[in-house]
């Protein structure tokens, strides 16, 4: 399989260094590096080459694609996508549209990446709204796929049904979860709880072929009660940001308490291995970025604060997504739903 991945070299807060080192690291990573044909580093050529000159790399598998403009986070996403045609985000997305790359990874402006992905790459036929999906660690040792995590603040019931369907495809194809359990995030487990949208969404999900368990609360996510947690982007983004902040605060508090007294420090020393493993499980850099599902190609949005490790694992996530044929499976699923609708309408 020919896997070429485009990477926005200008999107990270750290500048090109994180993207360059992440790309180099991805090509040499034993888990997925051998499956990547080439990585295209998109951005200001002189700056990228300056970092590459300091980093040993396989020049035959790394190519720099010049893009001299940068879209900043304080710019209007729609205006920037329209006017900055030679920005690293626009050029990278066009590489996917043109078929030169199978995926695009960016830690740049979230609004610009999502707006550009929808307008340049486009939605899969039949998909009403693409969604941002995030893998959150749970106590079962696995992950729960939260979707939508910020792309669609206002939704309709049929959007949430499709988020669930796409999330189910993702978990089956990428994480090999059989018959994924679906839960609708709500203010209570009772089916009559929530807004009119939540109630209508519950009915659609219940009538679907999905393994729908019903309403779940946000507190169920860390326990792995469901494999796919479905909600609108407003709720999902709050859950995501709170989870990230709470994890950092919890580890900071734990560290302070463990070093406060001699016996605590001694106990911490004995438990160092366990704490290290736990921190690794809740470290976002281990997962990488969030896939934007429902598009005619793969776009992965990484954190703006991503370091080289996060960028490397975002690239690795692309390999799993592509090998799993997620785009094709969502397209096939959507096509089946369109055929069912046309049949009901007598078309």
Image (tube, rainbow, N blue to C red):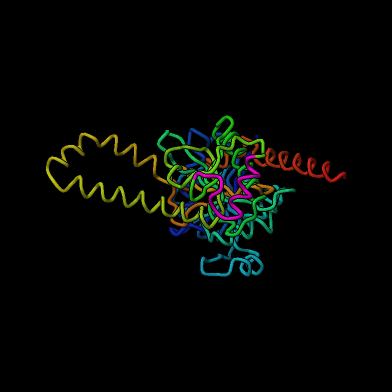
Vertical relation: 111 (above or below) 23: below
Most extreme residue toward the top is: 178
Q: Position of residue 118 (x, y in %)?
A: 66, 56
The percent coordinates of residue 49 (x first, y second) are 51, 55
Q: Is residue 38 or residue 92 the one in the foreground?
A: 92
Question: In the picture provided, is 103 more to the left or to the right than 279?
Answer: right
**Residue 267 vertical placement versus 161 (above, below):** above
* Residue 101 visible from this viewpoint: no
Task: Specify the quadrant that holds the N terminus.
Answer: top right
Q: Quadrant of residue 164?
A: top right
Q: Position of residue 282 (x, y in %)?
A: 39, 43
Question: Which region shows up in magenta?
Answer: 189-206
Q: Quadrant of residue 4?
A: top right
Q: Nearer the viewer, residue 190 or 145?
A: 190
Q: Residue at x 60, y 61 (%)?
A: 67
Q: Looking at this view, is 181 or 285 the one in front?
A: 181
């Amino acid at each position: 399989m020919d896997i070429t991945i485009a990477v926005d070299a200008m999107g990270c807060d750290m500048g090109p260094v994180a993207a360059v080192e992440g790309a180099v690291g991805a090509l040499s990573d034993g888990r997925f590096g051998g499956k990547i044909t080439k990585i295209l580093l998109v951005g200001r050529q002189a700056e990228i080459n300056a970092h590459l000159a300091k980093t040993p790399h396989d020049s035959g598998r790394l190519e720099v694609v010049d893009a001299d403009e940068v879209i900043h986070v304080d710019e209007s996403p729609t205006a920037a996508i329209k006017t900055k045609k030679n920005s690293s985000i626009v050029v990278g997305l066009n590489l996917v549209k043109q078929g030169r790359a199978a995926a695009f990874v960016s830690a740049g402006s979230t609004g610009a990446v999502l707006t550009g992905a929808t307008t340049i790459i486009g939605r899969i036929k039949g998909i009403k709204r693409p969604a941002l999906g995030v893998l959150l660690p749970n106590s079962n040792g696995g992950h729960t796929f939260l979707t939508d995590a910020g792309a669609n603040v206002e939704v309709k019931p049929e959007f949430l049904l499709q988020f669930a369907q796409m999330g189910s495809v993702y978990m089956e194809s990428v994480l090999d979860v059989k018959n994924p359990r679906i839960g609708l995030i709500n203010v209570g487990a009772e089916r009559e709880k929530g807004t009119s949208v939540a109630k209508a969404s519950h009915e659609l999900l219940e009538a679907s072929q999905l393994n729908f368990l019903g309403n779940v609360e946000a507190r169920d996510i860390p326990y792995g009660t469901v494999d796919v947690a479905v909600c609108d982007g407003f709720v999902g983004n709050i859950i995501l940001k709170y989870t990230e902040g709470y994890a950092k605060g919890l580890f900071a508090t734990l560290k302070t308490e463990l070093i406060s007294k001699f016996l605590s420090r001694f106990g911490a020393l004995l438990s160092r291995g366990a704490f290290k493993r736990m921190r690794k499980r809740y470290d976002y850099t281990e997962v990488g970025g969030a896939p934007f599902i429902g598009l005619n190609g793969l776009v992965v949005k990484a954190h703006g604060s991503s370091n080289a490790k996060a960028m490397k694992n975002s690239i690795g996530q692309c390999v799993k997504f592509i090998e799993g044929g997620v785009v094709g499976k969502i397209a096939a699923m959507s096509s089946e739903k369109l055929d069912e609708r046309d049949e009901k309408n007598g078309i």
